[in-house]
Image (cartoon, rainbow, N blue to C red):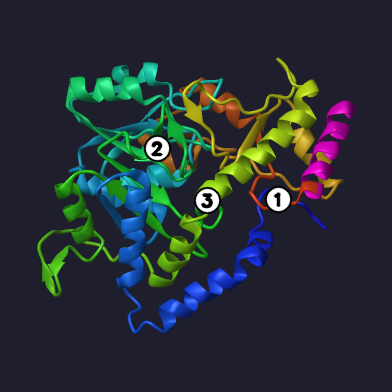
Amino acid sequence: MTTYVWDYLPEYEKEKDDILSAVEKVFSSGRLVLGDSVQGFEREFADYHGVDHCTGVDNGTNALKLALEALGVGPGDEVITVSNTAAPTVVAIMGAGATPVFVDVREEDFLMDTDQVEAAITPRTKVLLPVHLYGQCVDMAPLKRIAEKHGLKILEDCAQAHGARHHGSLAGTMSDAAAFSFYPTKVLGAYGDGGAVITADDDTDRALRQLRYYGMEKVYYVVRTPGHNSRLDEVQAEILRTKLARLDSYIEGRNVVARRYEEGLADLTGPGRLQLPTTNDGNTHVYYVYVARHPRRDDIIEALKAHDISLNISYPWPVHTMSGFEHLGWRKGSLPVTEKLAGEIFSLPMYPSLPEAVQEKTIASLRDVLGAL
């Protein structure tokens, strides 16, 4: 049997009764759109983060897009972010009519190099968009200082960082607004698509609720354009309510898996050899994905196929190098760290219900492959 980086079936077997009960609850409720389940999840997700507002939407991409629009971003504006991210981060910026401006990432943690941000600001800059990538947070203190100095908003992309902390603060609580994805692979994943935006600001939340529902403030009356049809589904919301109660245990399970990798591979690490993830001072890591690094990454991935292990790369193509974004004018070589990492990083299997025997097989196989290089 092939080992993959993610598999929801072991978790489903453990939680099947609760998941099916959540579905039955919605189907028996008499309300299938924006009912008690969405309202309940919004309240509980906001409470988890200690903020006043949560607006559930249909996916993480639209969570980013609608959040940008709610913060006043539109055509002619610029948003500073990174190219070492999933394409939806940039798709959302462009969907709001704005232009993405990239800064490079740091070699040690693959996160936004905040030292480069201020030099990227122009009169058109409206928002700073840090991506809390792979499960830990960007250093937010310098970003907040820059934003305050230049009168900018901050939108956190928390799609990969549910429950991560930065000097005690939860991801998503250190900015004007924060967007989350509940795609099934996420730390808090639905059984389909889903997303949400949290904020402490009343006006931002009001705008979000209008934007997700055609721009309407009340039924059939539009007060804002353009509006969208971007509502979180009742079934997914009820499943997420069930899983939210387990979020901290999911995070602990991911950390258990991470510790096994560290113990099983530590003697193979070093400069020019295997590099395992590090956790920055002040951060707690939730290991959305377990991203390792090796200069012969491609050889490793190919060799592991013979062991029935199929690994993933997050991400093999930096956004600025993709043909779909070439009109932005970025060229190869413009973000050297990002481009170097794209040729060396790879993800090992990581999910809280990963069977220990499967992980041990992965560790043993990787040791064999590295020993033969």
Instruction: Look at the image and tell me in which quarter the N terminus lies.
Output: bottom right
Q: Amino acid at mark 3?
A: Lys
Tag 3–tag 2 contact (CB < 8 Å): no
**Label 3 crowd bin: few (<14), some (14–19), many (20+), radius 10 Å:** many
Mark 2 Cα shell of 10 Å, populated few (<14), some (14-19), many (≥20): some
| Residue positioned 40% across, 43% down in the render | 89
Q: Is residue 51 visible?
A: yes
Q: Residue at x 28, y 45 (%)?
A: 51
Which residue lies under the disc numbered 3? 186
Mark 2 or mark 1: name the one nearer the start of the chain. Answer: 2
Q: Residue 231: x and y, percent?
A: 32, 65
| Nearer the camera: disc 3 or disc 1 | 1
Q: Label 1: which residue? A: 354
Q: Of callouts 3 and 2, which one flags the residue occurring earlier in the amino acid sequence? A: 2
In the rendered image, the vertical position of residue 205 relative to residue 252, given as above or below: below
**Magenta span of residues:** 357-373
Residue at 60% from the left image edge and 41% from the top image edge: 289
In this orientation, which residue lies closer to the viewer: 114 or 166?
166
Q: Which mark is residue 170?
A: 2
- Residue 315: x, y in percent? 57, 39
Q: Closest to the observer: 244 or 191?
A: 244
